[in-house]
Amino acid sequence: MSLLKLLIFQPILMLSAFTGTADGYYEYMMNECVYSTSDYSDMVFLASSSFNQVVYLQFNSSVGKYVGYTELGVKYAENFNKDQAFIQQKKAAVDRFCRHNAQIWDTAVRDKSVTPKITLRSAREAGGSRPAILMCSAYEFYPKKIKVSWLRNGEEMTSDVTSTMEMANGNWFYQIHSELEYTPKSGEKISCMVEHASFSKPMITDWDPSVPEAERNKIAIGASGLVLGIIIAAAGLIYYKKKSAGRILVPN
Ligand SMILES: *[C@@H]1O[C@H](CO)[C@@H](O)[C@H](O)[C@H]1NC(C)=O
């Protein structure tokens, strides 16, 4: 499942030898664990060394040895690869470091997924030749990785879809919004499909075009007003009837 793709990185050394002014040297070493399956079968351990942002040496556990990318890097790689004990230790890191830590991280953080709250609403109604716009939003979900797509009668729609990036709420949760511009046709079914680690299968929300939400609200407000008016009118009528019943009309 590509949705789970994760990168753990651990910068282990950053050296900057400043020469008194703003310029200097920057040595950077990074260990990474790259995987996209929940059983860690495709786990790769990478150890990269960079100097002034240029990667000159890298160990890739799938390759099983160091590879140099600059003249100096090639020399380093030759030397490191001769040291079998050192190479074995690096190869073991895919289990000892990556799988071990990924398991801890997954149980501590990644498996604590939080289901997105999904809303589907009309952002603009169709009018004349102007297409309609639907907005599908997912709120308060974790982790960040998510996919929002649109379906017309179950088929994915690719054109006229605009999505925002996942936006951090600042409280570990994220939100995302996707817009679909389309020309409504009768009898069709438009749906918003959300894929997230917290769902065992894609969550599909169907658009109900019967009465737009804004119209529904107006109708609800109007109906409430009407009911209130009838109650007041009825109360007034009863009050009037009671008052007038106590009075005897005397003909003059
Ligand atoms: C590691 O090596 C494998 C096998 O050559 C390759 O497929 C993969 O892309 C490499 N990973 C990186 C990040 O370079």
Image: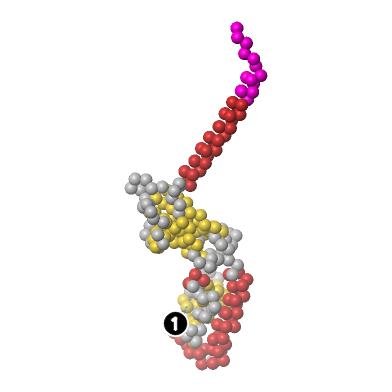
Q: Quadrant of residue 99?
A: bottom right
Question: In the picture shown, does residue 228 fall above or below 160?
Answer: above
User: Is 39 displayed left or right of 161 in the figure?
Assistant: right
Looking at the rendering, the stretch of residues picked out in magenta corresponds to 239-252
Task: Indicate whether 156 appears above or below 16.
Answer: above
Three-letter code, disc 1:
Tyr
Q: Which residue is pictured at 46% across the width and 84% down the height?
A: 68
Q: Residue at left 51%, top 54%?
A: 119
Q: How are the residues colored?
A: secondary structure
Q: Nearer the viewer, residue 30 or 210?
A: 210
Q: Tell me which residue sits at (47%, 80%) in the image.
A: 56
Q: Find the residue positioned furthest to the right.
A: 246
Asked if residue 27 shows in the view, the reply is no
Tell whether 185 sits left or right of 30: left
Q: Position of residue 21 (x, y in %)?
A: 53, 69
Q: Is residue 7 above or below residue 136?
A: below
Question: Quick check: is 248 in the magenta stretch?
Answer: yes
Q: Secondary structure at mark 1?
A: loop
Identify the residue at horizontal 59%, vertical 26% (top origin): 237
Q: Which residue is mark 1?
A: 69
Q: Position of residue 249 (x, y in %)?
A: 62, 13
Q: Position of residue 72 (x, y in %)?
A: 47, 84
The answer to whether the residue bearing label 1 lies less than 8 angstroms from the nearest atom of ligand 1 is: no
* Location of residue 80 in the rendering, given as x and y in whole percent from the top left corner: 52, 89
Residues 164 and 250: in front is 250
